[in-house]
């Protein structure tokens, strides 16, 4: 019985969707445990490309049950759009999709506040996805959140929304000089989606506990990445949830003692969307080439991603934070055309050499990366399905990563399709 967490080891967009899609063939349950529709997990198979934001990426390979856990914040309107997209592909969600009755809702006021707060931050803006994620987690922690279970009682739901609007409208009026929001408009928006969503709502904690008891295999699918974690990331330039391993337990109800594997996903280079420190960011033609070869544009917002060399100081920090005991390397093929490839093996902080990732973002901003250089292999790695068939210099690169991190890279991805994968 495997209970495996799949966690981004960087700033998100590591290619977790593809890995979860592959691993879900042998998983009974696939569970999203945090984040919301800020995530965009792109799946490519046969002639289909689909970007999932809320529904777990296990929906398309095999017949695993898919769970949206209590730790996720769900925009019900986005969810219904997504359910309809999936249904168009002739995938039946009935008795396969389960939504936690304790998952919190993102309502229109969260999205309005997300945008207004970002505008007010001016040059200190975080660069959020504008999906209402931060304000929804604020509601949750302030104990005024609306949960999935509230959709089952419309009268009570309206009452709760009205109460929340008292505070929100007063802030909209006096702080932001905006028009107030009305509970009836919000209820009107919700009505058509309530009917669609309610059949999927249940006690997913019990569902998962029963699954564990029956020895079923579970895959916990992280969104975003370790360096965007609200506690352990480059605060305040982070998301508002815990993508790291601990978040998988609180966001699903699965206890830490049940976890058997923690798989980290890292690209063969680094990207970041939004603002915040990024030590190995490239502002030259190499950065442009990474963006072009890797098609590095946000799956949720379409924003160009910032690109840079692989940062092993940050990666080792993510490995320690999550207890990662296996790794996947994605997008190796993006490096195929490079003459020279660099990886960061240390930082110089105020003149001192260190291999620790600083906890203070101002310090992360100041570090100067120390690089090790590799000769590029300059051959295509696409369609190679065995490690032994990779160009020698690509193997050397991967073996160095294993030696430096002390973790085996079990899966190597050489393209977006399922078939472009080396399983070692
Ligand atoms: P929020 O999660 O929308 O509040 O955005 C906070 C930060 O996390 C911003 O820098 C976003 O660009 C980043 N972010 C959120 N979701 C993702 C993701 O799925 N991939 C990469 N970055 C993300």
Image (tube, rainbow, N blue to C red):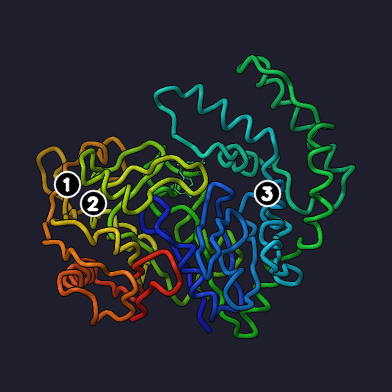
Q: Is residue 125 left or right of residue 174?
A: left
> Taking 22 as reference, is 345 above or below it?
above
Whether ligand 1 has any atom under 8 Å from the Cβ at mark 3 is answered as: no
Q: How many marks are shown on the rendered structure?
A: 3
Q: Is residue 408 left or right of residue 186?
A: left
Residue at x 28%, y 60% (from the top left corner): 268
| Of the pair 288 and 242, the residue shown nearer to us | 288
Percent from the top left, x then y, of residue 86? Answer: 66, 61
> Taking 128 as reference, is 242 above or below it?
below
- As helix, strand or loop, the secondary structure at mark 1 comes to strand
- Nearer to us: label 3 or label 2: 2
> Taking 179 as reference, is 232 above or below it?
below
Which badge, 3 or 2, is on the more N-terminal residue?
3
Q: Which residue is mark 2?
A: 309
> For mark 2, does the 10 Å Cα neighbourhood hold few (<14), some (14 to 19), or many (20 or more) residues?
many
Which badge, 2 or 1, is on the more N-terminal residue?
2
- Nearer to us: label 3 or label 1: 1
Percent from the top left, x then y, of residue 244? Answer: 45, 58
- As helix, strand or loop, the secondary structure at mark 2 comes to loop
> For mark 3, does the 10 Å Cα neighbourhood hold few (<14), some (14 to 19), or many (20 or more) residues?
many
Q: Is residue 117 left or right of residue 63?
A: left
Percent from the top left, x then y, of residue 182? Answer: 79, 27
Image quarter for residue 108?
A: top right
> For mark 1, does the 10 Å Cα neighbourhood hold few (<14), some (14 to 19), or many (20 or more) residues?
many
Marking on residue 104: 3
Q: Which residue is mark 1?
A: 369
- Nearer to us: label 2 or label 1: 2
Marks 3 and 1, Cα distance to the nearest angstrom? 40 Å
Marking on residue 203: none
Check contact, mark 2 vs mark 1: CB within 8 A.
Answer: yes
Residue at x 60%, y 82% (from the top left corner): 216
């Amino acid at each position: 019985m495997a209970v495996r967490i799949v966690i981004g080891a960087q700033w998100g967009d590591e290619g977790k969707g593809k890995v979860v899609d592959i691993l879900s063939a042998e998983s009974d349950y696939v569970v999203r445990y945090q984040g919301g529709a800020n995530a965009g997990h792109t799946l490519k198979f046969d002639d289909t490309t689909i970007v999932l934001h809320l529904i777990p990426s296990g929906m398309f390979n095999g017949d695993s049950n898919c769970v949206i856990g209590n730790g996720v914040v769900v925009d019900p309107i986005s969810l219904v759009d997504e359910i309809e997209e999936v249904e168009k592909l002739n995938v039946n969600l009935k008795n396969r999709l389960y939504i936690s009755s304790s998952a919190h809702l993102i309502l229109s006021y969260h999205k309005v506040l997300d945008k207004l707060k970002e505008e007010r931050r001016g040059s200190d803006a975080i660069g959020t996805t504008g999906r209402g994620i931060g304000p929804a987690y604020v509601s949750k922690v302030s104990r005024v959140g609306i949960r999935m279970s509230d959709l089952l009682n419309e009268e009570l739901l309206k009452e709760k929304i009205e109460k929340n609007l008292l505070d929100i409208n007063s802030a909209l009026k006096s702080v932001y000089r905006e028009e107030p929001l009305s509970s009836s408009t919000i209820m009107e928006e919700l009505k058509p989606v309530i009917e669609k969503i309610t059949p999927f709502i249940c006690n997913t904690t019990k569902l998962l506990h029963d699954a564990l008891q029956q020895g079923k295999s579970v895959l916990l699918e992280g969104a975003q990445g370790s360096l965007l974690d609200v506690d352990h990331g480059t605060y305040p330039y982070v998301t508002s949830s815990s993508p790291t391993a601990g978040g998988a337990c609180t966001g699903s109800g699965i206890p830490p003692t049940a976890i058997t594997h923690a798989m980290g996903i890292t690209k063969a280079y680094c990207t970041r969307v939004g603002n915040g420190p990024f030590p190995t960011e490239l502002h030259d033609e190499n950065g442009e080439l990474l963006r072009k070869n890797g098609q590095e544009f946000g799956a949720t917002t379409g924003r160009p991603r910032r690109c840079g060399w692989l940062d092993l100081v940050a990666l080792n920090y993510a490995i320690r934070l999550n207890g990662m005991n296996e790794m996947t390397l994605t997008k190796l093929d993006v490096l195929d055309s490079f003459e020279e490839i660099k990886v960061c093996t240390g930082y110089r902080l105020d003149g001192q050499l260190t291999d620790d990732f600083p906890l203070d973002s101002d310090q992360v901003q100041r570090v100067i990366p120390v690089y090790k250089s590799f000769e590029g292999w300059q051959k295509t790695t696409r369609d190679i399905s065995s490690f032994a068939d990779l160009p020698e210099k690509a193997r050397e690169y991967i073996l160095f990563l294993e030696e430096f991190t002390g973790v085996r890279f079990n899966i190597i991805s050489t393209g977006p399709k399922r078939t472009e994968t080396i399983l070692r």
